[in-house]
Amino acid sequence: MSRSFDLVVIGAGPAGYIAAIRAAQHGMSVACIDEWRNRDGNYAFGGTCLNAGCIPSKALLESSELYHRAQHEFGKHGIVVGDVGMDIAAMQKRKTAIVRQLTGGIGGLLKANKVEGLVGHGKLLAGKRVEFTPVEGDAEIIEAKHVILASGSVPIELPFAKFDGETIIDSWDALELDAVPERLGVIGAGVIGLELGSVWRRLGSEVTILEAMDDLLYMADRDIASAAARDFKKQGLDIRLGAKVSAATVDAGVVRVDYEDKSGAQSIEVDRLIVAVGRRPYTGNLLADDAGIQLDERGFIVVDDECRTRVKGVYAVGDCVRGPMLAHKGSEEGVMVADLIAGEVAEVNYDVVPSVVYTAPEIAWVGKTETEVKQSGRAYKTGSFPFAASGRAKAMEQTTGLVKVISAEDDDEILGVHIVGPMAGELISEAVLAMEFSASTEDIQRTIHAHPSLAEAVHEAALAADKRALNYVNR
Ligand code: FAD
Ligand code: AMP
């Protein structure tokens, strides 16, 4: 007799495992299937985010940032450290330990919530049945009242720069390097390209990032992107915009990268090339032909605003569906779907999904950019506050960047908050909460912010929107 569950989730990344836990908290019987295998041969829950994305990248960003600060900043604090050395093996070991702890933690969380964690491949068949093939043993058919597809995404491969795992590599390989490449090329100055480029630049690589678009971080507010660009330049990141790569050839361990820019055909030579041109939804062997699930022209599983596919009882969440490819977006979709299945009212507010780039300085924003607000035709006001005027930022020796608040003229609604500077990824939470609660700019102005804190910069930027900044000359 086949096993049956109220819910079967395929994929245990941040979208899938969160959905599974939330559903179990509602009292459902839940199985969560995942086949992720790490380079050491071990299977692990957590998906891209924990194993090859958010977490390992942040671990290396932190280590490389500390290395950089020890070399370039400690002296200003009067700390004399002498020669600062680097032990890449130890750095990587620390990263791997963090990943192991967290992925092991998910196994523990699933167990504690009585979710059956199944290691192997899941495939949706017709009639809400799931074929589960364990890593060892025979496939079984599992019956499900509901199914959530959370199969995630994989790096996009360029036909003219195929991954070889050695010299032309994807973001996962770039997090596993055991030596600092002398010359590192990166195709794509998106979030992943900038973060990985920053890690290896700080550790000593000569980094060239080739970006096809003419604007850096086209999705960010222009004031924020240009402030960030200035900092990246100071750090020695060579970002070439309007540079469309057309070929990459490996010869004796050296990659020659051909690209085209305004002045014509160009080329560079690097020792490693990271291809970071985005990710595509992954649905490999996920759906039987008669499963009834529709994919769009880019391969995303088609869902409505509540993540329903066109098969009743089957949902899809996370990177395999439309919307920003972000862990927290996927997790919130997972929570929403579990709540909907449990009969509750639930929604995801896609207008207030924060974006963070974990470079130094960090970049974070929520809501609309000034260009988008302008295009909407709504009258607006803006207020900015530079970290150079923040006491806390000065004490931290992190005075680069600013906070910018964009608000509606008519009813004071906060339309967007944009930050480049220290801890921007933490500071943005206040803005997200304010926008989620439909707070006005005056609400932030009248909220007490601890002194001295970086958050005061958000407070002052909100005040500046009405020319009431108290610690900066209003313009
Ligand atoms: P995934 O995390 O990709 O998980 C999907 C899981 O499903 C995988 O474990 C896969 O093995 C499994 N699976 C797929 N098909 C099957 C099947 N048929 N049977 C069994 N198992 C299956 N996002 C952020 O929000 N913040 C960041 O700082 C950030 N940094 C990143 C850095 C890098 C280098 C990368 C690559 C990504 C980063 N992301 C970040 C993006 C983030 O990792 C993804 O948005 C997130 O992991 C998507 O979650 P998901 O659950 O939809 O999919
Ligand atoms: P993201 O989708 O945010 O990860 O960013 C990927 C980036 O890669 C985008 O900014 C693209 O413009 C860029 N990109 C894609 N293809 C190429 C190419 N052939 N040459 C240079 N940049 C590219």
Image (tube, rainbow, N blue to C red):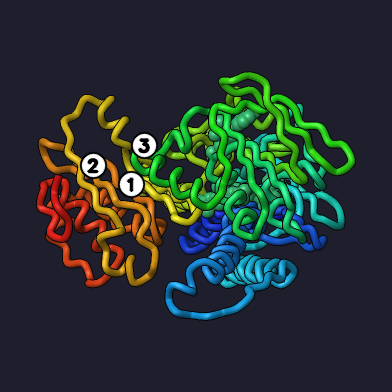
Along the viewing direction, whichever of 299 and 404 lies nearer the viewer: 404
Return the residue at label 2: 406
Residue at image point 67% right, 47% down: 171
- Whether label 1 touches label 3, CB < 8 Å: no
Decide if residue 124 is in sight here. no
Task: Name which of mark 3 and mark 2 comes first in the sequence.
Answer: 3
Q: CA distance from mark 2 to mark 1?
A: 8 Å
Left or right: where 85 falls relative to 71: right
Q: Could you say where residue 24 lies in the image, as x and y percent from the top left?
A: 52, 61
* Front of the two marks 1 and 3: 3
In the image, residue 17 sits, relative to residue 184, either above or below, namely below
The vertical placement of 266 against 166, above or below, is above
Inspect this view and state whether residue 435 appears: yes
Q: Badge 3 local density, few (<14 within 10 Å), some, or many (20+)? A: some
- First in residue order: circle 1 vs circle 3: 3
| Image marks 2 and 1: residues in contact by CB distance under 8 Å | yes
Please give the label number shown on residue 222: 3
**In the figure, residue 224 lies in which quadrant?**
top left
Q: CA distance from mark 3 to mark 2?
A: 13 Å
**Residue designated by label 1:** 418
For label 2, count other residues whose C-alpha is less than 10 Å away and answer few (under 14), some (14-19) or many (20+): many
Q: Amino acid at mark 2?
A: Ile
Q: Residue at x 16, y 62 (%)?
A: 447
Q: Is residue 254 left or right of residue 212?
A: right
Find numbered disc 2 in the image and state the secondary structure of the residue it sits on: strand
Is 243 rendered above or below residue 441? above
Tell me the SS state at disc 3: helix
Q: Nearer the viewer, residue 327 or 232?
A: 232
Residue 15 percent across, percent down from the top left: 54, 51
Residue 350, percent across and down?
38, 41
Front one among 435 and 369: 369
For disc 1, the neighbor class at 10 Å (few under 14, some 14 to 19, many from 20) is many
